Image: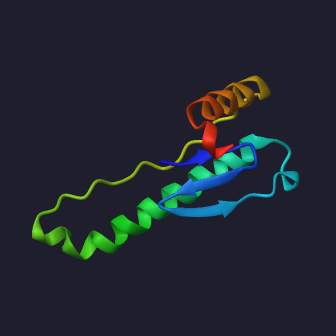
Amino acid sequence: MFHLTKNYKRLDFGKIDLFILNKYNNGTQVRRQAVGICVQRIRSKIQRLKPFDALGFNLPELPEPQEYELNKEEVDKMDKELIEKYPSAE
């Protein structure tokens, strides 16, 4: 699970990555990048486990990420919900 704060720090797997917001038009692209990074990490963990698949671990295939555009109102609503849920991370 990850959380984007007002300063767009991404907290994920115990690591903190900073996104510089002024490089982007709005928070949507930052969120898409953060989700992409999470999916890549999950995929790499599954790939590392693939050699053990023959032992009977039926590892699932991840679906390809789908593009989804958010409008400004949806982004603002998500920001408010996250800030309410994680007030100490602001």
| Residue 80 relative to residue 85: left or right | right
Nearest the eye: 44 or 11: 11
Q: Answer with the quarter of the image where residue 47 lies.
A: bottom left
How far across and how far down the image is residue 53, in percent?
A: 19, 68
Total marks in image: 0
Question: Residue at coordinates 62% horizontally, 28% vertically from top-left?
Answer: 81
How far across and how far down the image is residue 25, in percent?
A: 86, 45
Q: Which residue extends farthest left?
A: 56
Question: Residue at coordinates 63% horizontally, 45% vertically from top-left?
Answer: 89
How far across and how far down the image is residue 45, in percent?
A: 38, 67
Question: Residue at coordinates 72% horizontally, 50% vertically from top-left?
Answer: 8
In the image, residue 79 above or below residue 65? above
| Residue 67 relative to residue 63: left or right | right
State the colouring used for the structure image: rainbow
How far across and how far down the image is residue 70, in percent?
A: 70, 31
| Residue 24 relative to residue 45: left or right | right
In the image, residue 57 above or below residue 69? below
Q: Which residue extends farthest front?
A: 88
Nearest the eye: 22 or 65: 22
In the image, residue 73 above or below residue 19? above
The C terminus sits in image quarter: top right
